[in-house]
Amino acid sequence: MLRLSNPGWINKDLLNKNQVSDFINDDFNSINQHLDKLTSPNPIVSIVIAAYNEETNVIRCIDSLARTKTKYPLEIIVVDNNSKDQTAQVLNRLHVKYVFQPIQGCGIARQLGMEKASGKYILTGDADTWYPPTWVDCMMAKLDQPGVACVYGRYSFMADHNTPRWKLTIYETLSDLFVLIKAYKRPFLNAYGMTMGYVREYALKVGYVDTNIRGEDGRLAFDLMKFGKIKSVFARGSRVWTGTRTISMDGTLSNAIKNRLAMAFANLGSLFSKLQDHDTRTSANSSADFEENMKAIKKKVGVKRD
């Protein structure tokens, strides 16, 4: 599916507001009116959002979630992971359940949110992401099936004045191809916290890693496989949208494509073998190890960053 423009359901009135002071009372009132109609005191689904220094992004994120159209009673929980900006003040102005986690780490933050949740199912998200109105029902259509323990969705990048959508579509199409390849033997590698869901009862039994390391989402998904299947959600209305911060780390979009293709092909053979059981809490792939592996692969295949 070609995605040649930014989605029409995103609230364009909030897009160009770059400071908390740009958001007026009417913005918060509008979001809260939607939240009051949407959220339930007896949720079946709990949406848990991790936030670290996302004072403006979290407003746009919650605005998108507040416009959800769903048949499931739900609640929204935002975990402030010891932010140093005005994230806490912003959350106090929004009608969401807000908890504070002083220990740094995305997995640690998501763990607290899961423990404070009331729903049977957890959907996780990131504060710098927009969620379509049908996201919840698309994710739940798979997660609510017998024998399913975890689901994951896909994501797209918002075009801006530097990067047009047609270029981003090329990147995303290649990414989706490798998602299909990884789904064969490594479905947990496709589970990203920005659009992921699982059965809360099972997740509480295994829990997130309790250190600040990369890949906390995939580690949880791996441990959840003992309880059921991991399913992909490719429904059109399930795709979430985010900014291009991760792409900008590579300097340019072309660099991002080259780097990820190089890493994907370097690891392609291993994706078709069965992964041995391992302890997700002591295995490799810490943030430091991940960066070193990235450098080694790029050096091996001759890919450079600008």
Image: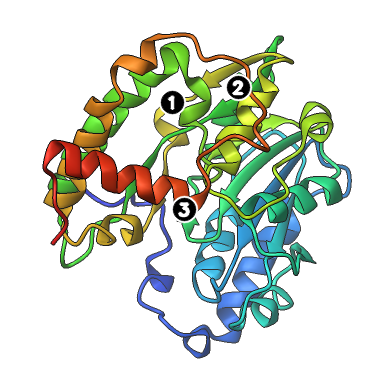
* Distance in Å between CA atoms under marks 3 and 2: 37 Å
Q: Where's the N terminus, which quadrant?
A: top left
Location of residue 100 by image quarter = bottom right
Q: Quick one: label 1, few (<14), some, or many (20+) residues within 10 Å? A: some
Q: How many marks?
A: 3
Q: Where's the C terminus, which quadrant?
A: bottom left
Q: Which of marks 3 and 2 is nearer the N terminus?
A: 2
* Distance in Å between CA atoms under marks 1 and 2: 10 Å
- From the viewer's side, name the closer residue of 289 and 240: 289
Residue at point 12%, 49% (across, down): 254
Instruction: Please say if 298 is above or below 31.
Output: above
Residue 187, given in percent of the width and then of the height, sits at: 49, 21
Residue at point 40%, 72% (across, down): 13
The answer to whether the residue labelled 1 contacts the one labelled 2, judged by CB atoms less than 8 Å apart, is yes
Q: Quick one: label 2, few (<14), some, or many (20+) residues within 10 Å? A: few
Task: Label 3, secondary structure: give it.
Answer: helix
Question: At label 2, which amino acid type do we have?
Answer: Ala
Q: Earlier in the sequence, mark 1 or mark 2?
A: 2
Q: Name the residue under label 3.
A: 288
- From the viewer's side, name the closer residue of 286 and 254: 286
* Distance in Å between CA atoms under marks 1 and 3: 35 Å
Residue at point 13%, 45% (across, down): 303
Q: Name the residue under label 2.
A: 141
Left or right? Give the position of 57 relative to 179: right
**Residue 276 seen in the current view:** yes
Task: Label 1, secondary structure: give it.
Answer: loop
Badge number at residue 235: 1
